[in-house]
Amino acid sequence: MSRLFPILLPVLLIALAACDGGDRQASVAVRETAMPPPAVPALRVMTYNTSLFDATDGALIARLASGDDNARRIAAVIQHLRPDVLLLNEFDHDSAERAAELFQREYLEVPQAGQAPLRYDFRFSAPVNTGVPSGLDLDGDGASDTPNDAWGYGRHPGQYGLLVLSRYRIDAAAVRSFQHLRWAAMPDARRPLREDGTPFHSDTVWQQLRLSSKSHWDVPIHAPGGVLHFLVAHPTPPVFDGPEDRNGNRNFDEIRLFAEYVSPGEKAWLCDDAGRCGGVPADARFVIAGDMNADPSDGDGVPGAIAQLLQHPRVDAGFVPRSAGAVARARGYGLALRGDAASKTGDYGPRTGVLRLDYVLPSRGFVVRDGGVFWPTDDARAADWLTASDHRPVWLDLEVAGP
């Protein structure tokens, strides 16, 4: 709307009154005051662990170029749900973003399983810690060149990467990345200890360890209703270690990083890769999204890990996405659950069962209009799409709350 409109409106009303009389003036004035403000469309935000990774560098690019059935299934799910802002976990990163471009052009922009094509004009991808050699013995096995010795577990740089897609403009120059933040920089960090209470890592190693197993990003997006800070990450699974629980402790503190980031205070230790320190602005609207590898009540994570976000005063976690498919799968496995089966977001087989690991958590200041976990039951037509990944997409429809 032109900035001149509020100035011209009284002049317009006076002119109409002079031409048509007092009744016309009252009629126009009533209609003007009764007009609702322009509607701000709901914003659909989604996270999806796609399992689009490969054990060798460049292999995902080759798969996507030759035609990949799992990528078609993933694209069908995305086309069906049609999110406005989307995080893809476990999507291999390459510096030229060839995999991301192929997935967009050859899969999302092509109809899949009867779904309409979908285009995202904006995306963000960047290096991650997975597969990047540290040159250190991080797992204590005497070697320093295994996948466990990378800054984040991985067989090549970029494995299990992150990819953000958006219908709305991403302010790439304002993105903050915490790939290089040292774990030891976090006050009261959960340093892994041996059973005898001594540190698992030497002081030299501990002072170099990076906190983020992939990366933590703050991606500002110019969405309807104002700037949205899309806070995305994929903390390490809290398993595949020993009594020192180094992965469980790292998972806890990776989640804590975002809890600290949205908390008040200067936090001189919380510095991004460009050297800028501190958290998100106090008046900012944000959504935390990703595969957090932490269930509130089941699984092997450190107790309370995800509660750092679910119970945070700036986070509105009251709406819990659910599905019928998770309930049916949990019933089929027959495993005892402490948590709500309908809220689970992934299927990890008959030994582990179903867990809630994937989250879309808005800040206060949004109204949640709808949401869910896309997990149709096995008899549904779309059930075949889910075979591409052991995770299920989670989505919310958000509107900016009124004054």
Image (tube, rainbow, N blue to C red):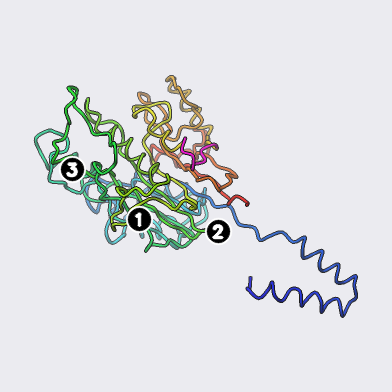
Circle 1: residue type: Arg
Mark nearer the viewer, 2 or 3: 3
Residue marked by disc 2: 224
What is the C-alpha distance between the residues marked 3 and 1? 22 Å
171 or 84, which is in the foreground? 171
State which region is magenta: 311-318
Residue at screen point 37% across, 33% down: 305
What is the C-alpha distance between the residues marked 2 and 3? 42 Å
Circle 2: residue type: Pro
Asked which secondary structure carries label 3, the reply is loop
Q: Earlier in the sequence, mark 3 or mark 1?
A: 1
Quarter where residue 50 is shown: top left
Circle 3: residue type: Gln
Q: Earlier in the sequence, mark 2 or mark 3?
A: 3
Q: Earlier in the sequence, mark 1 or mark 2?
A: 1
147 or 324, which is in the foreground? 147
Crowding at dot 3, Cα within 10 Å, few <14 / some 14-19 / many 20+, comes out as: few
Residue marked by disc 1: 176
The label number, if any, that marks residue 303 in the structure image: none
Crowding at dot 1, Cα within 10 Å, few <14 / some 14-19 / many 20+, comes out as: many
Residue marked by disc 3: 207
